[in-house]
C-alpha cells in the first residue's frame, strides 16, 4: 500500500538526528587486517588497531533519493521477491538504487534491496516500515543510522561490532555537531572486501561535505574493543 507522505516528510527522512529523525534541514545541505591478525594494543590510545596506520580504505554510501526529471521515462520495472510488481522507475534511478541498496521514492516510501531474483532487472526490492527503518535497513533487521552505520566484510569485522575510527574523531558533521569517531558494523555490500569500510552518509551532499572535512582522506585506521564506543554495542 502506497503511503502518501508529503514532500516535507520526504525531506525529513534524509536528515541527521543521531539515532532518531530530527534537525532535518541541516543534514540535507546541498549544498582489515587478515582475520585474526591483531597488531597488539596501542599503549596510549584506542583499543586494538586492525591494520597498520591508514591500512583500511574508506568509501561512502547514501540513500538513492528519487527526484523525477521532466520528460524522464519511467519504464524500468521492479518486483518483490514474491514476483509482485513493485513499480516502474527511470533507468537512472534504478541504477542508483541497485548501487546504494536503500532509497526513498518520490512518494515517500522507503525501499530496500531484498535479493537477487528472476524478475525485472534481476534484483528485487521491498518496502520498509518508515517508522522502523527511516533510512533503510542493513544486514538482518539492523536500521541504518546516519553517520554511525558502516558496511564491512564480516570476515574481518563482525556485525554489530562497535569500531573506533580516529580519523573521524573531531570532524564536523553537516548539522554542526562533532563526531566522536565511533561507528558500528550494521551492513555489508558486494564490493566490500577485506580492508574496506563503507560509511553511511545519508545523502550524496553529505558525502561531499564530509570529504571536505577530511581533506580528501580516504584511508583510515579502525580499532576494535575501544571502551569509548561500547555505548553503540547492541544489547543481546
Image (cartoon, helix red, strand yellow):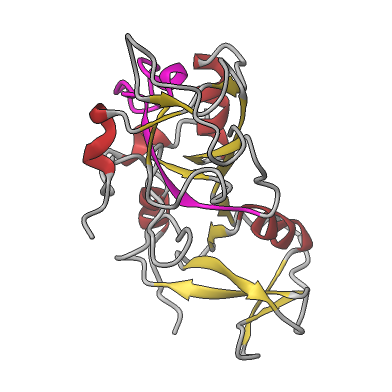
On whether residue 58 falls in the magenta region, the answer is no
Percent position of residue 63, x then y: 54, 50
What span is in magenta? 165-189
Q: Is residue 82 above or below residue 64?
A: below
Percent position of residue 212, x then y: 55, 16
Q: Quarter of the image for the N terminus: give it.
A: bottom left
Q: Is residue 129 above or below residue 97?
A: below
The residue drawn where x is 60% and y is 16% is 217
User: Is residue 124 left or right of 28 when viewed as pictured?
Assistant: right
Q: Quarter of the image for the C terminus: give it.
A: bottom left
On whether residue 184 falls in the magenta region, the answer is yes
Q: Nearer the viewer, residue 97 or 52?
A: 52
Q: Nearer the viewer, residue 230 or 98?
A: 230
Query: For residue 23, which quarter of the picture?
Result: top left
- The count of marks equals 0
Query: For residue 164, which quarter of the picture?
Result: top left
The residue drawn where x is 44% and y is 37% is 28
Q: Nearer the viewer, residue 93 or 37?
A: 37
The residue drawn where x is 45% and y is 79% is 2
Main secondary structure type of the part rendered in magenta: loop
The residue drawn where x is 59% and y is 57% is 66
Percent position of residue 80, x then y: 60, 82
Percent position of residue 111, x then y: 52, 67
Amino acid at each position: 500500500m502506497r503511503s502518501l507522505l508529503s514532500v516535507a516528510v520526504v525531506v525529513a527522512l534524509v536528515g541527521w538526528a543521531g539515532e532518531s529523525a530530527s534537525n532535518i534541514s541541516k543534514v540535507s545541505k546541498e549544498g582489515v587486517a587478515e582475520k585474526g591478525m591483531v597488531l597488539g594494543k596501542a599503549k596510549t590510545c584506542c583499543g586494538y588497531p586492525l591494520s597498520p596506520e591508514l591500512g583500511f580504505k574508506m568509501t561512502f554510501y547514501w540513500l538513492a533519493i528519487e527526484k523525477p526529471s521532466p520528460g524522464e521515462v519511467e519504464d524500468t520495472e521492479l518486483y518483490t521477491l514474491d514476483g509482485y510488481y513493485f513499480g516502474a522507475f527511470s533507468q537512472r534511478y534504478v541504477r542508483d538504487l541497485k548501487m546504494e541498496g536503500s532509497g526513498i521514492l518520490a512518494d515517500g516510501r522507503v525501499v530496500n534491496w531484498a535479493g537477487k531474483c528472476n524478475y525485472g532487472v534481476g534484483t528485487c526490492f521491498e518496502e520498509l516500515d518508515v517508522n522502523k527503518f527511516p533510512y533503510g535497513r542493513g544486514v538482518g533487521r539492523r536500521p541504518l543510522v546516519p553517520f554511525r552505520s558502516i558496511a564491512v566484510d564480516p570476515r574481518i569485522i563482525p556485525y554489530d561490532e562497535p569500531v573506533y575510527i580516529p580519523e573521524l574523531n573531531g570532524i564536523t558533521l553537516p548539522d554542526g555537531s562533532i563526531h566522536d569517531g565511533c561507528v558500528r558494523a550494521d551492513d555489508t555490500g558486494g564490493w566490500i572486501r577485506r580492508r574496506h569500510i563503507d560509511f553511511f552518509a545519508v545523502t550524496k551532499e553529505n558525502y561531499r561535505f564530509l570529504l571536505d572535512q577530511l581533506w580528501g582522506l580516504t584511508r583510515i585506521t579502525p580499532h576494535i574493543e575501544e571502551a569509548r564506543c561500547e555505548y553503540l554495542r547492541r544489547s543481546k
